[in-house]
Amino acid sequence: MHEFPTGLSYDEALAIVDEVAAAHRLDTESLALPRCHGRVLAQDVDAPLALPPFDNSAMDGYAFRHADLAGQGDGLRLAGVQFAGAALALALDAGQCLRITTGAALPAGADTVAIKENVRLDGERVRIPADTVPGANVRYAGEDVRVGDRVLHAGQALTPARVSLAASLGLPSLRVARRPTVAVFTTGDELVEPGLPLGPGQIHDSNRDLLMGLLRADGLEPTAWPRLPDDPRQVEIALRDAACAFDLILTCGAVSAGEKDHVPAVLAQFGRTHFWKVRMKPGMPLLFGSLDQARFLGLPGNPVSVMATYLTFGRALIDGLQGRSEPRPRWRARLADAVDKTHPRREFIRARLSAGEDGSLYADPNPATGSHRLRAAADSNALIVIGEGPQRLAAGAVVEVLPY
């Protein structure tokens, strides 16, 4: 267990998350291609065929031998038509051309295609511009992918383009990492379901929808459990029950040092605490451990803390469990206003990203500072990342940003 009065550094904590995730990598499954979108690939893919698989036309036009241009006289003789998908095995003799459609196989003897709009027709004669360059508008077999090329790598996220590439190679399925099953808990006697009246001292539960939405946006299908009251026995029963059935447990709240914060004690007694507290703002009380078969991430209760800790540690844990080796994109932007940070922790500041007329990406910090101020998060679309240590950053300084 790693626990210090001031918490671990952000990088130290992230390294522990990566190490634990790697040691508890989820198993893999073979899925039909349409179900692979967004999954993490668990196999290398070598091309079983070339792309394109044959020389073909890139345009609707006329296929011919470029050597015939010099002596075409009143034009080349039209010898037939080649449509895409038809296997006519046509061949050209000297002085001939063939009408061809986009994607159709290039007939034997042809090496160039003239665009339909650029030729002049006179009955069965086709006059082709003399300045047509050799090889124009021809897609050559294997120019994109050669047989045996490694085109996809284990650990990559399967984007639509990558799934499409697998489809073009004729692959009906891929082996991918199983997505983690996720149990989501919110905690606190003060929480009330949206739509119900509030009593004295009560608030509506916003963290559940926030965390469920963040997980779903990352392609997961989380399960929302009933809210946990401030009762240690009920917290213990619910968390231990979920730990037997889920790969990952995410909780919101009850991870600080108050007398109603029972989650750390449950983890300490029945599981293993990997670390508790990270030098970050917001999100310092972050708790990470293992409970039965589940990895456990206890997020603080303030909504901006939930966002900051999920986007950093939650995503890292989920990616690690699935064996994702491809880093997520890291964005950089220029500050639209100065930032003055006086404390030593790494800070995540709400901001709105926008593109300037000069083509630069700008991050405009929201003036709200409290981690409870959800409206500021709703008005923003990113978190500015300011590293550890007091620092003043002038307007125009380049900073890392986490879009959400």
Image (cartoon, rainbow, N blue to C red):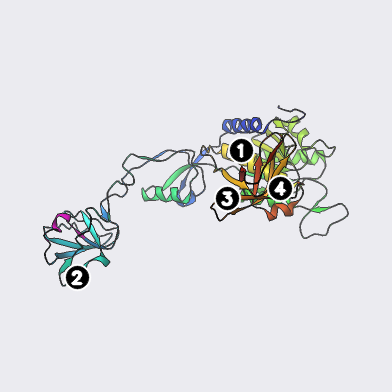
* Between marks 4 and 2 in the image, the one whose residue lies nearer the viewer: 2
Q: Are marks 3 and 4 in contact (CB under 8 Å)?
A: no
Residue at image coords 27%, 48% = 141
Magenta highlight on residue 66: yes
Q: Are marks 3 and 2 in contact (CB under 8 Å)?
A: no
* Between marks 2 and 1 in the image, the one whose residue lies nearer the viewer: 2
Disc nearer the start of the sequence (3/4): 4
Residue 317: mark: 1
Disc nearer the start of the sequence (1/4): 4
- Give the residue type at disc 1: Leu
Q: Is residue 82 visible?
A: no
* Between marks 1 and 3 in the image, the one whose residue lies nearer the viewer: 3
Q: Which residue is identified by label 4? A: 225
Closer to us: 18 or 264: 18
* Between marks 3 and 4 in the image, the one whose residue lies nearer the viewer: 3
Q: Which residue is identified by label 2? A: 121
- Give the residue type at disc 3: Leu
Q: Are marks 2 and 1 in contact (CB under 8 Å)?
A: no
The CA span between labels 1 and 4 is: 20 Å
